Image (tube, helix red, strand yellow):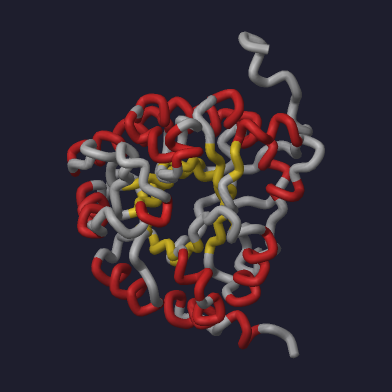
Amino acid sequence: PRGAPLCTVAAPAPAPPVAVAPVDETLSVAPMMDYTCRHFRHLMRLLSSRAVLYTEMVVANAVQHNLGDLERWYGCTDGHEHGAPRDVLQLGGSDAAMLALASRAALAYPYSAINLNCGCPSERVAGSGAFGASLMRDPAHVAALCAAMADATGGALPISVKCRIGVDDDDSYEQLRAFVDAVSAGGGVRHFIVHARKAILNMKLSPADNRKIPPLRPELVHALVADYAGAGLRFTLNGGITSLTDARAQLDASPRLAGVMIGRDVINRPFYYAHADRVLYGCADARARAPP
């Protein structure tokens, strides 16, 4: 009923939190609804032991009603060959209590971080759902959400944000910096994954059109890397990267860039990325290390 407490069911009690150090995210696979399920992530883990794999977005409001069946959303791959979990749970929502509940539930699973979706432009998410990319319009609220998520995990899991470079006409570099400043200062966020396109919400474009029509501006992400050098912030570039060659070029352009995130190209040709460990990390490919 309207006005009832938002969280009436407690998440399963996790083990005492143990802080997880940030992992190397030189290459990450983007969260993609209907694609980056645990089965696809298992395939990608067979192809790369190093890549960081993001889950599909899990809507925080749904977690409260499914606490007895979280495995279907929260189940992880077993990519711990290099000493640390390499899966990231992405959550979506705009309610601090719900996001805190969903974040605390993640402590029972071997994630390396939790990510807040501030970039999805779909009508169901950023429109009627009032989260995703629409959150970029209220940096103070995003900061409060991230702080609640961090408090819920006792600081055991880093909280990151995936965002766009702007929303509609709020797309200046100064506004992007103001978002980073507010969320890092108020929310304790140290890692931003930035899709180098703005989100167009006022024309009700489809998510597919929002990946094509807004121009790519990777130079803004590289500018963030330069401007926040020494500030303890990390930036990952997402958008328009369609090969390991592209990935290597972006990393070489800004040596302080934390990494690159690839989305649709991984879906289109996953086996191409079987050479990612060698090309981007300088180690043997995962398949070469597999037992006969």
Q: Is residue 81 above or below residue 282?
A: above
Q: Residue at x 30, y 35 (%)?
A: 179
Q: Quadrant of residue 26?
A: bottom left
Q: Residue furthest right?
A: 68
Q: How far across and how far down the image is residue 205, in percent?
A: 36, 47
Viewer-proximal residue among 187 and 272: 272
**Which quarter shows the N terminus?**
top right
Residue extending farthest to the bottom is: 292
> Please, is residue 277 above or below residue 111 in the view?
below
Where residue 153 sits, quadrant-wise, is top right
Q: Residue at x 52, y 55 (%)?
A: 31
Residue 123 figure quarter: top left
Q: Residue furthest top?
A: 3
Q: Nearer the viewer, residue 121 or 100?
A: 121
In this picture, residue 69 sits left or right of residue 284: right
Please count the marks in the image: 0
Vertical arrangement, residue 51 with respect to residue 208, above or below: below
- Look at the image and tell me in which quarter the C terminus lies: bottom right
Residue 226 visible, this angle: yes
Task: Give me the residue at 69% from left, 64% from top.
Answer: 39
**Observer-nearest residue: 245 or 58?**
58
Picture coordinates of residue 219 (x, y %)? Answer: 21, 58
Q: Position of residue 166 (x, y in %)?
A: 28, 42
| Image-based side of 78 in relation to 215, left or right | right
> From where the camera sits, is residue 24 visible?
no
Q: Position of residue 121 (x, y in %)?
A: 41, 44
72 displayed left or right of 211? right
Taking the spot 68% from the left edge, 83% from the top edge, the residue there is: 290
